[in-house]
Image (cartoon, rainbow, N blue to C red):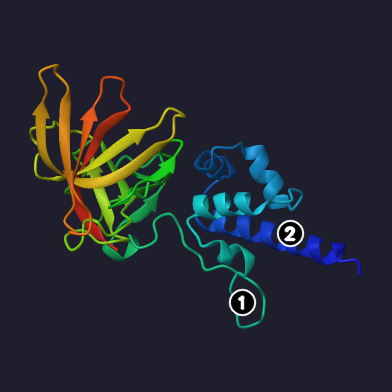
Amino acid sequence: MDTRPNATAFSRAVAKAVGAVRRQRGWSQEVLATRMGTTAKMIAKIESGKHDMQLSTLWRVAEALDVNPDALLHPPADDDGTSTIRRVGPLHGLAEHGWKRVSKLDPHRIPVLDLEPRAGTGTTHPKAVQVAYARPPNTRHLRESELFLARLRGDSMEPVYHDGEWCLFSRAIGLPEVLGRAVLVRETDPSGLSQWTVKRLAGVTVTAEGQRRVELASYNPNWPNRVVEIDESGDVGIEAVVREVLGR
């Protein structure tokens, strides 16, 4: 039996699902490509159904889109039987707290980044990608600079910080001043990919050689503390401090 027509239909259905999720997040093909470490041309090929994806590629696509691979293979059906995927925009969860999506021309815009830093083991990104702008519900942040929004993932900071909560971060930091507070840590590997985690800065020491070491703590007792070195090459750094937790 020739199964090629069925295989072609299946590939097109998966390709359609990839494009649907990307658009529902408000991302361009360039944004998805950056998250995957590939090119916009390859994303266009995937979404056209002309690229016969291997399972490893499907997994990378799903991870970049932050969905279970099954969501691309079996998107839920509407009441009329048509296959769709629930809309989840880049500001999903923020609207309930009064935040509004705005254009880059808004003078009070705050960038929304796709980092989704982990309270636990970090996820890897080629770089932090800006996916939208948001405006706060009042004026308390409008005079501040160096702010951005990102959504927290993981459970190592339970019960103080929870999986899925939006956090407002500030890049204006100094290590002594943020001791004891939750910070965004970046660790970059030799390939240039970075892992992002949120931990409590429990301590800072300086070695005889002048090397700074910071102790990163978790609130969840299932996650042990660890010590990392802040190096001059910039491979490890404290990038921001949690300014405020906004909720899920």
Looking at numbered disc 1 in the image, what kind of residue is underneath it? Ala
Sequence-earlier tag: 2 or 1: 2
Rendered residue at 29%/52% (across/down) = 120
Residue 232 location, quadrant: top left
Q: Residue at x 64, y 54 (%)?
A: 55
Task: State the image quarter where residue 10 is shown.
Answer: bottom right
Q: Which mark is residue 11?
A: 2
The answer to whether residue 80 is above or below residue 172 is below
Q: Is residue 178 visible?
A: no
Which residue is more in the foreground, 138 or 17? 17
What is the x, y in percent for residue 222? 22, 59
Q: Nearer the viewer, residue 100 or 193?
A: 193
Query: Looking at the rendering, in which quadrant would you find the N terminus?
Result: bottom right
Left or right: where does residue 75 sit relative to residue 245? right
Above/below status of 165 relative to 149: below
| Residue under label 1 | 77
- The amino acid beneath tag 2 is Ser
Q: CA distance from mark 2 to mark 1?
A: 18 Å
Q: Is residue 112 left or right of residue 15?
A: left
Count residues near mark 2 (Cα–Cα under 10 Å), then give few for <14, some for 14-19, many for 20+.
many
Q: The residue tagged with tag 2: helix, strand or loop? A: helix
Which of the 4 image quadrants contains residue 230?
A: top left
Callout 1 crowding tier (Cα within 10 Å): few <14, some 14–19, many ≥20: few
